[in-house]
């Protein structure tokens, strides 16, 4: 059975005589019938249409008092005992019902009803034979169950989660009216990447799914056990009633019924009622083996208190009420057992009443019973083998869609410009595979923008990497690209002297034999000096060609082949610039002749150095002037632009030293030039950053 309707009613009451004038009658000639207080309105209950064999518990109060006899007590056997007990009877043309008076001082009664209309007849007679009858109705309605009309969707789409999975339930793939069916009535299986996990959708793509009637719940069958006060036996399924000093506490593992300390003022109790639950689609009347342990606690026998735990079953079909056990904790003088176990056969659809009763409430400490190890064992016959609704197993297609973009990371990259003044990066150059992931596993770098660089991009720029997963979801991250020109390819060909200075610095860093290095650098210096002093282009080209011949001769020997090719390419670019008529000197005038040139002043005595090189933070510049005169110390980028003038003054002859703080500039390669009245010296310097 599904959710049972449990109703506790607080109702207005109707006085059968319409007044309270009874206290003045003479009992010797008593003509006044007892007064009956009962619910003033009929009680209407509506059950869930899908609750097959559903029943409901209804609580109400009835009290009877007589001017001469005093209070009367309820008797649910249908027998009126004049002067002491009134009867409460059930009459119905549509069904039965069970009724029991709770062991309380406030005259509470509990009824168990299936759908139907029930007349509750109350009869009371005093000792003088005065009879009164009153009645009211309990109406339990239940509509016909709605029809179930379900079929599989031929094709549905499902979005995968961050784990590339999706939990698929029957209500996601079925269309139509569920009626009294529930999603738990069906079992979904998917023929996907991992069919073993049933209704968990794994991976991308179209997959076939099947929906079948689930039949027995997981683990159901003969001996299926429900343990504790959870699920259908949780607190929400019970109806409880306590007197002033009674209390009830539920936990998932225990139920405690008890009464607090009192002073001997009547019966105190705590009662809990439950309809034994069945399972969806199963009719009531299935035999269940119920067992539990009990433990009496805080029992104080002073004052003759009597404590009992009573158990009753109520059958809604036969109307039978049966007391199935009475556990005596104390009869007022002698204590009973302090703990034990109860085993009780009971049917689904029947109600169980547990009542803890203190008959005279004279204990100064009160008492209680704790029920644990609540166990209900269901045979396999309690589960429906076939659905109680129209159904045929079906199948369809489910498209598993990955709509989660990959989580990606970029890494920095450094590129060096070629002799053509260009460089490029591939998407894989800036893709951080270790720091990237996708819910479905596949991550593919697509593009990087910009991916090509020229001399105009020298320095640090930001490029954007686009990455796709296997479903085409895109993500973008930013990568830092450092574009460098360590070989000075970006120096404009117009600056002939700066280009030769960069090539000279390259040669000096090769670690060649001293004689080879000296021969090469001297030839380049002569070519630069001749050209910048106004000599003809042919003379400068002759010097350059002789240098190429020298390099070719030593290629693969004293000069490594790759270095030789680099030097030759650099020299050839100088020849091409001269031939094209675009070469000029950065000094804007004539440079001093090279050392030892006939008829010219010697510039070799003028020296320039920087330490360390490359460097971080600050560097020391040292230069030597053979004689006093005007000296200018300047810093150029590789495009020939003057960035800083570090010195411009008339200086004494001798050694000089300056500290250069490069932290205002971007890391990279620069040219340091010392210009005097007689010479121009250039050195390449590399600033590596902080």
Image (cartoon, rainbow, N blue to C red):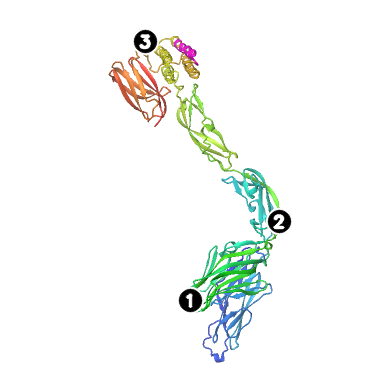
What residue is pinned by disc 1? 363
Q: Which quadrant of the rendered structure holds the C terminus?
A: top left
Q: Circle 3 — which element?
A: loop
Q: Name the residue under label 3.
A: 596
- Identity of the residue drawn at 40% across and 18% down: 586
Which of the 4 image quadrants contains residue 350? bottom right
Q: What element carries label 1?
A: loop
544 falls in the magenta region: yes
Task: Please give the label number shown on residue 476.
Answer: none
Distance between the alpha carbons at the discs numbered 2 and 1: 61 Å
Q: Is residue 253 left or right of residue 482?
A: right
Q: Earlier in the sequence, mark 2 or mark 3?
A: 2
Residue 506 or residue 598, whichever sits in front: 506
Q: Do the numbered discs 3 and 1 sit on residues whose CB atoms are within 8 Å?
A: no
Distance CA(mark 3)–CA(mark 1): 127 Å
CB under 8 Å between callouts 2 and 1?
no
Q: Determine if the magenta segment contains residue 462.
A: no
Kindly report which numbered mark, 3 or 1, lies closer to the viewer in this rendering.
Answer: 1
First in residue order: circle 3 vs circle 1: 1
Q: Nearer the viewer, mark 2 or mark 3?
A: 3
Q: Which of 136 and 58 is in front in this view?
A: 58
């Amino acid at each position: 059975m599904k959710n049972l309707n449990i109703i506790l009613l607080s109702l207005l009451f109707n006085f059968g005589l319409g007044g309270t004038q009874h206290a003045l009658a003479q009992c010797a000639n008593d003509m006044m019938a007892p007064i009956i207080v009962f619910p003033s309105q009929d009680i209407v209950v509506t059950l869930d249409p899908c609750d097959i064999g559903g029943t409901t518990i209804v609580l109400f109060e009835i009290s009877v008092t007589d001017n001469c006899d005093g209070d009367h007590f309820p008797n649910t056997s249908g027998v009126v005992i004049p002067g002491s007990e009134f009867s409460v009877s059930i009459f119905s043309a549509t069904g039965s019902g069970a009724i029991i008076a709770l062991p309380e001082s406030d005259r509470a009664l509990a009824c168990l009803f299936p759908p139907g209309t029930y007349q509750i007849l109350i009869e009371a007679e005093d000792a003088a034979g005065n009879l009164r009858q009153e009645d009211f109705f309990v109406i339990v309605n239940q509509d016909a169950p709605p029809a179930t009309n379900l079929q599989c969707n031929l094709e549905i789409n499902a979005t995968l989660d961050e784990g590339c999975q999706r939990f698929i339930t029957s209500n996601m793939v079925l269309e139509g009216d569920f009626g009294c069916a529930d999603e738990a009535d069906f079992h979904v299986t998917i023929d996907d990447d991992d069919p073993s996990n049933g209704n968990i959708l794994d991976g991308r793509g179209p997959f076939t799914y099947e929906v079948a009637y689930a039949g027995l719940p997981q683990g159901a069958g003969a001996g299926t056990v429900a343990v504790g006060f959870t699920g259908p036996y949780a607190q929400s399924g019970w109806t409880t009633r306590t007197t002033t000093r009674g209390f009830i506490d539920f936990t998932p593992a225990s139920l405690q019924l008890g009464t607090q300390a009192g002073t001997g003022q009547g019966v105190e109790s705590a009662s809990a009622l439950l309809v034994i639950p069945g399972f969806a689609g199963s009719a009531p009347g299935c035999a269940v083996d119920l067992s539990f342990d009990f433990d009496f606690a805080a029992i104080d026998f002073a004052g003759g208190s009597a404590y009992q735990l009573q158990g009753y079953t109520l059958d809604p079909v036969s109307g039978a009420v049966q007391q199935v056990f009475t556990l005596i904790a104390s009869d007022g003088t002698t204590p009973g057992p302090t703990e034990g176990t109860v085993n009780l056969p009971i049917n689904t659809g029947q109600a169980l009443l547990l009542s803890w009763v203190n008959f005279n409430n004279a204990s100064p400490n009160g008492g209680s019973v704790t029920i644990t190890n609540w166990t209900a064992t269901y045979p396999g016959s309690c589960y429906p083998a076939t659905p109680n609704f129209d159904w045929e197993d079906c199948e369809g297609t489910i498209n598993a869609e990955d709509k989660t973009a990959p989580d990606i990371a970029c890494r920095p990259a450094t590129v060096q410009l070629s002799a053509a003044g260009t460089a490029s990066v591939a998407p894989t150059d800036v893709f951080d595979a270790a720091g990237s992931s996708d819910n479905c596993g596949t991550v593919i770098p697509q593009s990087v923008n910009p991916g090509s660089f020229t001399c105009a991009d020298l320095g640090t720029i930001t490029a954007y990497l686009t990455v796709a997963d296997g479903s085409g979801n895109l993500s973008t991250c930013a990568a830092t690209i450092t574009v460098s020109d360590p070989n000075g390819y970006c120096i404009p060909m117009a600056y002939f002297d700066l280009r030769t200075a960069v090539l000279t610095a390259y040669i000096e860093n090769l670690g060649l034999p001293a004689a080879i290095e000296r021969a090469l650098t001297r030839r380049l210096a002569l070519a630069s000096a001749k050209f910048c002093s106004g000599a003809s282009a042919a003379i400068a080209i002759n010097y350059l060609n002789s240098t190429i011949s020298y390099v070719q001769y030593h290629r693969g020997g004293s000069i490594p082949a790759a270095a030789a090719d680099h030097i030759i390419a650099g020299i050839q670019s100088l020849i091409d610039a001269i031939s094209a008529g675009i070469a000029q000197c950065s000094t804007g005038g004539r440079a001093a002749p090279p050392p030892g040139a006939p008829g010219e002043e010697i510039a070799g005595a003028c020296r320039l150095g920087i330490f360390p090189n490359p460097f971080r933070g600050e560097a020391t510049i040292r230069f030597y002037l053979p004689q006093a005169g005007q000296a200018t110390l300047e810093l150029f980028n590789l495009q020939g632009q003057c960035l800083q003038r570090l010195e411009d003054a008339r200086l004494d002859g001798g050694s000089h030293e300056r500290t250069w703080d490069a932290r205002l500039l971007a890391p990279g390669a620069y040219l340091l030039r010392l210009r005097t009245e007689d010479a121009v010296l250039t050195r390449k310097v590399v600033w590596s950053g902080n």
